[in-house]
Amino acid sequence: MRIGESLSHWLTPEWESWFLDFAQKEKLLREDEDFRNDRFLRRSVIPHIRNLSELFNRKAEASPSDGYWSSSSNSPNLWLSYFLSFQLFNMTRVASIWEELHRLGYDREKRPIRRILELGAGLSAGASGILLGERHGPNGLDGSVRIATIEAQRSVSRLGQKWLESFGPWLGAPDLAIDAFVRRLTPQELLPPKAPKFDVILSSYFMNESLESPQVWARAIHGLIEHHLEEEGLFILCEPALQEQSRKVLEVRQELLKLWDKKPLAKILTPCLGHQACGALAKEGDWCHEETSWWRPQWLKLMDQELKLDHRTLPFSYLVLAKSQRSLGAILPKVGSQVPYRLVSPPHKVGRGCEFYVCCHLGKSKTRSKVKLDVERGDVLLDLSIEQKSDRWQILN
Ligand SMILES: C[S@@+](CC[C@H](N)C(=O)[O-])C[C@H]1O[C@@H](n2cnc3c(N)ncnc32)[C@H](O)[C@@H]1O
């Protein structure tokens, strides 16, 4: 997914100074420590990130009830390590999703966004991602915003609240009020009936921590949208790009479409730009994911090097729904009445032209252009003229 220059470079030296100050105030660092110091990173941060990565990649065995937050005898170092890695990655992912809506002209008919809810909030990366995204691609956040977070672990929830209370003003974000709720959510009851309505509900890297089926999650999301999302509100789901977790997102989407057979409760905005049958699910073992390229400061590059990871790009899966009866073209005017085609792979050179996979109202297919196109994964091409060949589609215009 293309993101703007300013969002891709958001980790500035000014952010580093703010974070140093925040981390020292919250006693995640001593006065004489600096997270950018190689020795400090190697000793106090990298081992925690290695452990967390292993736990996140072994989901089925290590559910959050195993308490990965408290698995360390040194929680401040663990929290610091999450802030310096997964927090920044997930925020940037959510900010990219937010900025894409802006790029597609997202129009809420001038209804300001005043209330945001993050489920399974951890240290509030998802909500922070919206604030960050709004800074670089505004979608109508009000001057005064109330953010609710729900998180199972009390100490994490409290620290996430402090992060938001400090990061928001640093970003120049509007007047913020934060309600940090400590609760163990189940898809059977995500919110109590008396809970209020929100303009945006989001879940970032949370659904994958649950072993419940896509059917159960689809019903849960349907219920949330029906009872707790304002008209024209957004529901945002951001999940890992791995095959299993990504297919779960696609299956949730498919189950929602089944529930909405007669009358859709919401519109599927991105990435699909429509309610067509999923092109990736059509094939066993296939899946769909996005990738954001961004700029990493030196200390993040060092962490990647040591951990043998590569965060030059941030892969993820996502789904954005709008509770609206308006047409997709009215909600996303840059698409308007044109037919959208989404690149779901990077392009490869073929002769003088290029080839890539495209997903659209017709399904998913290998697609070839006779001329070289300046395109990348995630780009939306409009009103293509396509000829269907036996093994691929050919772009004619
Ligand atoms: C991987 S973290 C993601 C945190 C944050 N949303 C992000 O994007 O970085 C998942 C969080 O969900 C919390 N969590 C897991 N299961 C939960 C449940 N049933 N109810 C509430 N929180 C839960 C975990 O404690 C953890 O903080």
Image (spheres, grey):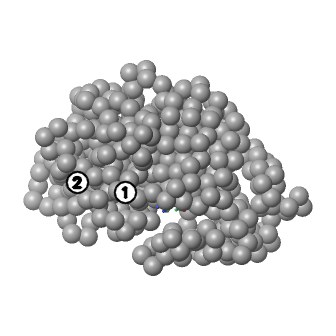
| Residue 318, image x, y percentages | 39, 52
Q: Nearer the viewer, mark 1 or mark 2?
A: 1
Residue 216 vs residue 145: left or right? left
| Residue 4, image x, y percentages | 53, 40
The label on residue 187 is 1
Name the residue at 25% across, 59% down. Answer: 215
Name the residue at 55% across, 67% down. Answer: 310
Q: In this view, which residue lies farthest toward the right?
A: 32
Q: Residues within 10 Å of mark 1 (few under 14, many from 20)?
A: some
Q: Residues within 10 Å of mark 2 (few under 14, many from 20)?
A: many
Between 103 and 210, the residue placed more toward the observer is 210
Disc 2 secondary structure class: helix
The answer to whether residue 43 is above or below residue 21 is below
Q: In this view, which residue lies farthest toward the bottom?
A: 61
Q: Amino acid at mark 2?
A: Gln
| Residue 328, image x, y percentages | 27, 33
The answer to whether residue 389 is above or below residue 58 is above
Q: CA distance from mark 1 to mark 2?
A: 17 Å
Q: In this view, which residue lies farthest toward the top?
A: 110
Q: Which residue is mark 2?
A: 254
Name the residue at 57% across, 32% down. Answer: 145
